[in-house]
Amino acid sequence: MNVFYTSALHLYALSTEVASFFLRKARMTRLGQWHTNGILRERIDPRARYVWFHAASLGEFEQGRPVMELLRTRFPEYKILLTFFSPSGYEVRKNYDGADVICYLPFDTPYKVKKFLNLAHPAVAVFIKYEFWLNYLSELRRRRIPTYLISAIFRPEQLFFKRYGGWYLKALFCFDRLFVQDRASALLLAAHGVTNVSVCGDTRFDRVLAVQRQARLLPVVEQFVAGDRPVLVAGSTWPQDEEILLAYFNAHPEVQLIIAPHEIHREHLMDIESRLERPSIRLSETNDQSVADKDCLIIDSFGLLSSIYRYGQMAYIGGGFGKGIHNTLEAAVYGIPVMFGPKYQKFREARELIAAGGGVCVTDGGALALQMNEWVAHPQACRNTGRIAGDYVQQNSGVSEKIFREIPFSHVSAGRPDEVPQE
């Protein structure tokens, strides 16, 4: 194992320790990892067989969730260990009832890796999309614990494929099988000697379909959209998105807006309200106020957006003027057209939605206004675009079943931990 990598991990752990005195997220990571061994000692049943799922954060958890739930249905004799690296995943899903044990994953240093695996003794390990921890993967391979990567996607610019990235490429040879989203990933891997690959697609398609079936009825939102004006649902927006969205909304009284900003702290909500020139109300304020006379509904709570998209005739997905767009599939699954900003190239589903005719990239406020005016003036064209988006999601579903058929859960025995090292 690369000594420089391990040294860098020790420095990373030390920097997190120092940062924890000043940064809340670093403090949560440090304390969460500190509790991991105690959680494992208390909750792991040494007689049971565990499938270990690791998700970097919340998005990866949602991708792995359909496979976890299939496992729970098909092989209820297995227990599920779920780990997160990021507090934004763990804190939201630490009470997820689909897993038996949930904890933080300790840093990828040799001692902590062996300690974790000795206590957890997984029979199978499943990594979701990202997180290539070299010491964990090497130790899993040494112990002959079957290890899989699901919903992965690879691009030429990643470190594995650089001239100086050969040491990191070794991580990919530790997996028994890699389940990738597209053929381009498989070809790229094959060009670098990684051939134990299956092209299955993205499990997020299965997840958004499950969410659609379980979507919550929201009477307040139903009341808000009860009229005959078209409704734009803008989800996970950032200030750059809001600048062009609100400018359009203020100038077009024929359109209603439901906006769910990515950040809902007080200052951001007040900034949105200061830009609005038409009547608006926060969802949290609707308990004793009617929404019938409002043109904009501001969603100031988490967990509702995936159900709210159903109430729109069109959707705008935020993030495309920043680091990258958020989840387009959450909206597309309802058969409505989706718009987003120009930073979408890393997202296969966005590229394919555009190619299919179910998604549109808008590069500025003028482009957004042109597209909105087209959909508002020609509602049938809007519905046709939405139908294409919904069909795209349906046609790409069933990924979890494909993955499940290739992982031989029925033939895996319980892991055999080495002697637990002394603390």
Image (cartoon, rainbow, N blue to C red):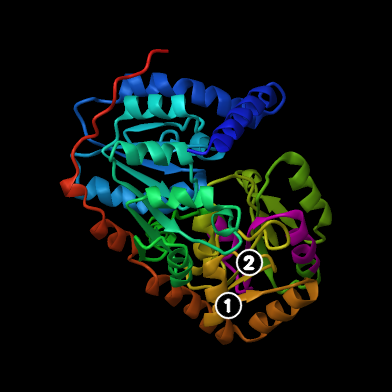
Q: Residue drawn 76% across and 55% down?
A: 239
158 or 245: nearer the eye? 158
Q: Identify the residue position indicated by label 1 in the image.
A: 354
Q: Can residue 98 be spotted in the picture?
A: no
The quadrant of the picture occupied by the C terminus is: top left
Instruction: Identify residue for label 2.
Output: 344
Q: Is residue 184 visible?
A: yes
**Residue 223 belongs to the span the image colors magenta:** yes
> Which of the 4 image quadrants contains residue 246?
bottom right
At horizontal 65% and vertical 48% (from top left) the residue drawn is: 289
As shown in the figure, which amino acid type bears the numbered disc 1? Ile
**Residues packed near mark 1 inside 10 Å, few (<14), some (14 to 19) or many (20 plus):** some
Taking the magenta stretch, the answer to whether it contains residue 258 is: no
Q: Is residue 75 above or below residue 381?
A: above
Secondary structure at numbered mark 2: loop
Residues under numbered marks 2 and 1 in contact, where contact means CB atoms less than 8 Å apart: yes
Q: Pinpoint residue 200: horizontal percent, then vertical percent.
A: 36, 66
Spot occupied by residue 348 in the image (x, y as percentages of width and height): 53, 68
Amino acid found under the numbered disc labelled 2: Tyr
- Which range is magenta? 221-247
Residue drawn at point x = 69 percent, y = 21 percent: 21
